[in-house]
Amino acid sequence: MDFIKMLREDKDLSELLCDVCDLEIFSEFKTPQDEFGHLAYNILGKTFAQTGSGIEYILLEDGSIGFWGSEGECGRIADNLNDFFEFMVNCPYWSDYLDEDEYQDIEELGAFAKEVFAEHVESAAEIDFDLPRAQQELADRLGIEKKEDVTGILMRFYHYTKREPRLISTYIEDDGSIHSGTGSLFDR
């Protein structure tokens, strides 16, 4: 399914995605952030979405999905667009799941995921937003299964962040000094 095309053509669906996941799909692909020529990536790609805070999602040349954050975080988060949208719909505000210790035991990860999601539901309710209802509507309209247990999705995400070659950004300062990340969002 061509999720990007579907979202570009359906404004209401695109707004629902933004409400649930803080994710805006661009009307066309863009060049990834380059920080005025200072930033380069080891894998080519095209930016297709961003969050309200400027985080970018990049469709990489191998079909996987990369992430670039304004604080220099960079890495792969999904192997393809289907996995990316399944992850976004089932784990909105996914950066709250970035505690590598929790991924060492499936049962702990499951409990952690439920706790994180409950916090999201509570925060959304404070602004009169029914996150579970909106999330289910988004899943239904995109044809994605909304899962009660997201441990399998989170474990795939974890493995994608470690997959080689990693997506690495390199920042070159005006003085020529170079800063590169590890390419894993769990390495902080």
Image (cartoon, rainbow, N blue to C red):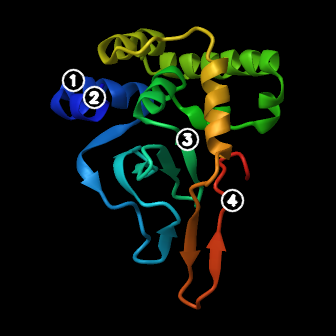
The secondary element bearing badge 4 is classed as loop
Secondary structure at numbered mark 2: helix
Residue at position x 47%, y 43% in the image: 64
Q: Which of label 4 and label 1 is nearer to you?
A: 4
Q: Which numbered circle lies on residue 15?
A: 2
Give the left or right position of residue 133, taking residue 13 as reference: right
Query: Residue 170: where, in percent of width, then height?
Result: 57, 70
On screen, residue 186 above or below 40:
above
Q: Earlier in the sequence, mark 3 or mark 2?
A: 2
Earlier sequence position, callout 3 versus callout 4: 3
Q: Of label 2 and label 4, which has the lower sequence position?
A: 2
Q: In the image, 48: left or right of 181?
A: left
The answer to whether mark 2 and mark 1 are in CB contact below 8 A is yes
User: Whole-Å distance between the Cαs marked 3 and 2?
Assistant: 23 Å
What amino acid type should be assigned to the residue bearing mark 4? Answer: Thr
The location of residue 1, given as percent across then percent down, is 30, 25
**Quarter-wise, where is residue 8 in the image?**
top left
Residue identified by numbered label 1: 12
Residue that mark 3 sits on:
77
How far apart in space, not on screen, are marks 2 and 1 (Cα)? 5 Å
Residue 48 drawn above or below residue 71: above
Residue 74 in the image: above or below residue 15: below
Location of mark 4 (residue): 182
